[in-house]
Structures are given as structure tokens and as C-alpha cells.
Image: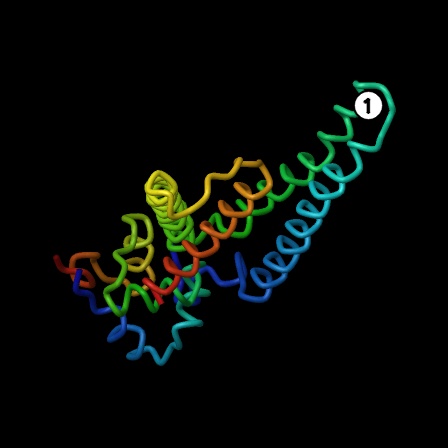
Amino acid sequence: MEISDAGIAGKGSAANRNRDAIVLFVIGVLTGLGFNWTIRFLPTYEGPAWLKLGISLLPWLLFALFMRFQRRVWRSDELEKLIDRDAIVFAFYVLLGGFIVLDQLQAAGLVTRFKWANGPITLVMIFAMLAGMIWSKRRYR
Amino acid sequence: MKNRLKELRTAREWSQAELAERLDVSRQTINAIETEKYDPSLPLALKIGRLFKRPVEEIFEA
């Protein structure tokens, strides 16, 4: 592959990358809202089971679009992929350590035992991932 | 890994952003390579070598 002195500018200019990042952000927000809406709407909906299933799958279509677009935005930048991988690893170990410490504190009676629910666990996972991304980005800044 | 990326870039009077655009990576990637916080993949190292018309081992050294 020949690269001229001008490089390969134009293939993925900064303006295009910024535009793609904004589109990705919008799709991400819509996906989050979609999941939120189905979780709130489905308990009150009294339609047939197949339609409930269909509605519950709708935000996954947005999620699929998000993942597809995400590849387009980040496909060319290996450091960003590395940052994401590091963030996932960071989040995993923080959650693992956090849950073990929490269990110890509960066993010692210092923290009351509570029932785990999907919602709080999902939120904790999202925040752990965001913290991981901030930590990882700072590493390579 | 030590490298001469900054030296080669400044010799051509390119900003980090300009070099990033030529290589189709983010400016952060260029900065991380120059500050030796990150070693590029082999394809990116080869791309850098082609862009500056130098062998990879002349730009990067272990």
C-alpha cells in the first residue's frame, strides 16, 4: 500500500469523526430511552404475549444499530479499542472486588443485607464501566 | 518503546492533529505514541514508516 506525502486524509477526517461521534451519541441516548420506555410500558400493557415480546425486542434493534455504528466510528483507531478493553477489565475487577468487600461487610453485620435487583446492578455496571473509561483515558492522555 | 515520531513530525511542521488525520487515527493516539505511553500495532507502525518513508526500526526502537 502506497501512502503519499498527503497521507490518507479524507478517508476519516476529524470532521467526519466528530459527526459520527455525535450520531453515535444520539443513537445511544435513543437506545437507553427505548429500554427505559419498554421497562415502564410493558408492565401496564395488556396485549398478547407475542406482541409484548416484539415490543421488548424493539430497543435491541436500536442497540444493534448502535453497535454497528460504533464499529464505524472506532474501527480505525486502535488506541480507542484498547481504552474500551481496559475499561471493561477495570469495571470487572472493581465490581468483583466491590461485591466481595460488600459481602464481607454484610457478613460482619456492618452493612445490612439487601435483595439484589436487576435495576441497581445494571446501574452499578454502567457506572463501573464509565469510571473504567475515565481511568483508561487518563492513562493514555 | 522509544520512538522518533515527534522528531519526524516536527521536522515536517505537522501538528499532532495533522499527523493523526494522515494516519486515520485520533490525535490522542499520536500523543500517546510520542509520549511513549502506548506502542502502536504493527499495521500502524508500518503505516507510519510508509508515511515518513523510513524503515520501522529507524522510527521505533525497543
Judge the density around disc 1: few (<14), some (14-19), many (≥20) Cα neighbours within 10 Å: few
| x, y percent for residue A6 | 44, 67
Chain under numbered label 1: A
Name which residue lies at 72% across and 37% down.
Answer: A39
- Secondary structure at numbered mark 1: helix
Quarter the C terminus of chain A occupies = bottom left
In this view, the residue farthest toward the right is A47
Indicate whether A104 appears above or below B20: above
Residue A23: horizontal and vertical position, in percent? 66, 55
Locate residue B16, reporting x and y percent: 39, 73
Q: Which residue lies furthest to the front in this view?
A: A109
Q: Mark 1 points at which residue?
A: A51
Residue B9 vertical placement versus B21 (above, below): below
Q: Which of A101 and B10 is in front in this view?
A: A101
* Residue B1, quarter of the rendered image: bottom left
Give the image location of residue B14, x and y in percent: 38, 77
Along the horizontal axis of the image, is A85 left or right of A29?
left
Residue type pointed to by label 1 = Leu
Residue placed at 37% from the left, 43% from the top?
A: A109
Left or right, B19 with reference to A122: left
Residue at figure coordinates x 35%, y 81% from the top left: B13
